[in-house]
Amino acid sequence: MSTAYRPRVMGIVNVTPDSFSDGGQFFSVADGIEHARRMIAQGADILDIGGESTRPGATPVSEFDEILRVVPLIEAIRKASDITISIDTMKPGVARAAIKAGATIWNDVAALRFSPQAPEVAAELGCEVVLMHMLGEPGTMQDAPRYDDVVAEVEAFLLARAFTAMAAGVAKEKIWLDPGIGFGKTLEHNLALLAALPRFVALGYPILLGASRKRFIAGIDPSAHEASDRLGGSIAAHLVGAQAGVAAVRVHDVRETVQALEVFRAVRSVAPTT
Ligand code: 7PJ
């Protein structure tokens, strides 16, 4: 296998009641462990553990309950494997508990805006931090999102959040940026951001791209009502990211994504002869 670049693959592991049919706490953690094992076997480089749904209309989770969901799973993964673990949370208290349990990346869709303490907590934890762009809040973000220039506005937001994090003491080397596909964006906004990925990569921070099974794909293929119908579109979007040089892609379908990215890498590793 060649050693040319390809993005790392971050597998999504949700421990939310939405994603696991009934069953109590015990069963969702057990399912999460099984899910994590499968993704590791399929070649994931990072596992992103989430205990709160950010879907519009999802019920909010208390910090206590979120910690109860994610910490046992992180501890179990940490025991079984040395894979990199990230915690998908907006809450500093959850990030703190997750990092203590073995996660090394705080993936924050609120880009450290959820609480005034968030930037300082990120600095204190010394972990890597993913700063993602979201317009507004999860509950209302898809209500007619508007931008004058979506690419410029998302870029300015991400740089401002990076400076806030650094001012609080987060090292520049620990910061990732993410344009936040689907978070307060129309189909046109999402496509503009995907097309502008080389510009985001040129900012000099590792870029995370999360397009997996998102609704904009159904805006292109209206037959893809179900999230599980969107694998082809997800892979296409992540290959666009690979071409642009993103550092990692956040996906549900690890096996298929690793395969696509290995084909990308194999082609990239051949020096063109013409
Ligand atoms: C993202 C995320 C994303 C980052 C979610 C879903 C919604 N974190 N968490 N980037 N999406 N960094 O997976 O459909 O795009 S939750």
Image (spheres, grey):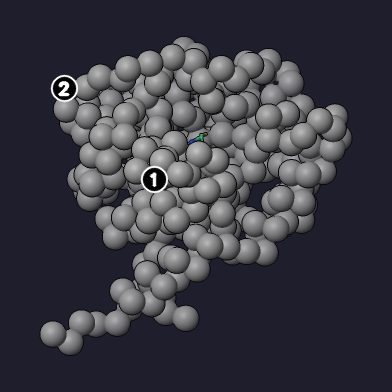
Badge 2 or badge 1: first in the primary sequence: 2
Q: Residues within 10 Å of mark 1 (few under 14, many from 20)?
A: few
Mark 2 lies on a secondary structure that is loop
Place of residue 212 in the rendered image (x, y in percent of width and height, measured from the top left): 48, 46
What is the three-letter code of the residue carrying label 1? Answer: Asp
Is residue 129 in sight in this rendering? yes
Say if residue 168 shows up in the picture. no
**Left or right: 9, with 201 as reference point:** right
**Camera-side mark, 2 or 1:** 1
State the quadrant of the C terminus: bottom left
Q: Give residue 221's mark.
A: 1
Q: For the residue carrying disc 2, how many other residues have a C-alpha within 10 Å: few (<14), some (14-19), or many (20+)?
A: few
Rendering coords of residue 213 (x, y %):
49, 44
**The residue positioned farthest toward the bottom in the image shown:** 273
The correct choice, above or below, for 17 with respect to 274 in the image is above
Please determine whether, in this image, residue 3 is positioned above or below residue 51.
Answer: below
Give the residue pinned by disc 2. Answer: 148
The image quadrant of residue 193 is top left
Amino acid at circle 2: Asp
Q: Which mark is residue 9?
A: none
Residue at image coords 71%, 50%: 35
